Image: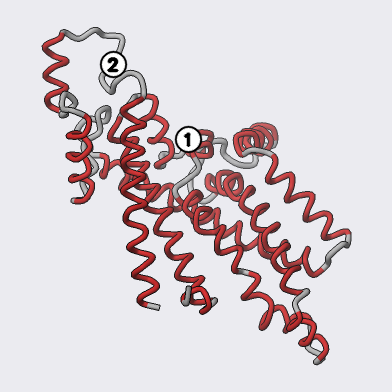
Amino acid sequence: MLRYAILRILQAIPTLLLVIAIAFLMVHAAPGGPFDSERVLSAEIERNIDNAYHLDEPLPQQFFRYLSGVVRGDLGPSFRYRDHSVSEIIRNAFPQSMRLGALAIMLALLLGIAAGLLAALKKNTLIDRLVTAVAMIGISVPIFVVAPLMVLVFAVLLNWLPASWSGGGGAERMILPVIALALPQIAFIARLTRASMIEVMSSDYIRTARAQGLKTFSIVRYHALKPAMLPLLSYLGPAIAGVITGSVVVEQVFGIPGVGQFFIQGALNRDYTLVLGITIFYAAIVIALNLVVDLLYGFLDPRIRAR
């Protein structure tokens, strides 16, 4: 198991380096610059600014300078948020995104797995068709449509919940963002759980367990649940990363000061270091969670470790 874990970690390092290189090139290929504005600066001031932020250096030199900082944990200064480094901005914003994402993924796992198991055990019944139809709607309707509709219905028309992060205090302001962020994940998890459980329940060893007189609850708990969760684990790696880091749309709609909102502002302001820092931060979380999923796969299925 230790050898398997070391190999997966060694494979993750070049992946992260590739992400950094691609993100760096894409950000610098975008038109405009971080200090472009309606105010025209003199040539001397522009040269001084470029020199201060090393923007006058050749692109390869800028990349290796930036990479050396990333290796030391320094994501550089923000070009727009003066007196703040990118690391400080992420450190201050991430707890909001983390709290929102953690609640959303817990809700998605609870409802999604329960709905998927129920649909699989009631295959081809009205309950199964209802769960499948609702899941398809959840997958098909984009979150940028769902979130504003929830604000319109529950905040504006019914006046049950605050419409934005600043519109209320305590737990009530978390309800709409968490549900909006969790809905697509509930739909995906329900469909994955249903399909996987149906496949497992048709296996020979499950039929043998039934022939021995075991109850359905015991079969699911002791024989079917563990193998049925393997496909779900593959999905949960990037899903948890995307949810925990916070949905950009949800944070914008509800005015949550999370990492996603700073990412949008950084892109609009051409804040190279902020966009790069958040991209690298997202990538590191995705890679780390996929690594955890690989290790869990190896734990749940020893055959994978032998490959």
Callout 1 amino acid: Gly
126 displayed left or right of 244? right
- SS at badge 2: loop
Compare marks 1 and 2 and give the one earlier in the sequence: 2
Q: Residue 78: image x %, image y %? A: 25, 33
State the CA–CA distance, disc 1 to disc 2: 26 Å
Q: Residue 220: image x %, image y %? A: 71, 78
Is the residue 185 above or below the residue 209 in the image? above
Dot 2 corresponds to which residue?
36
Dot 2: few (<14), some (14–19), or many (≥20) neighbours within 10 Å?
few
Q: For the point 32% across and 44% down, which residue is it?
A: 90
42 displayed left or right of 21? left
Question: Mark 1 or 2, which is nearer the eye?
Answer: 2
Q: For the point 15% across and 29% down, which residue is it?
A: 54
Dot 1 corresponds to which residue?
255
Q: For the point 34% across and 50% down, which residue is it?
A: 16
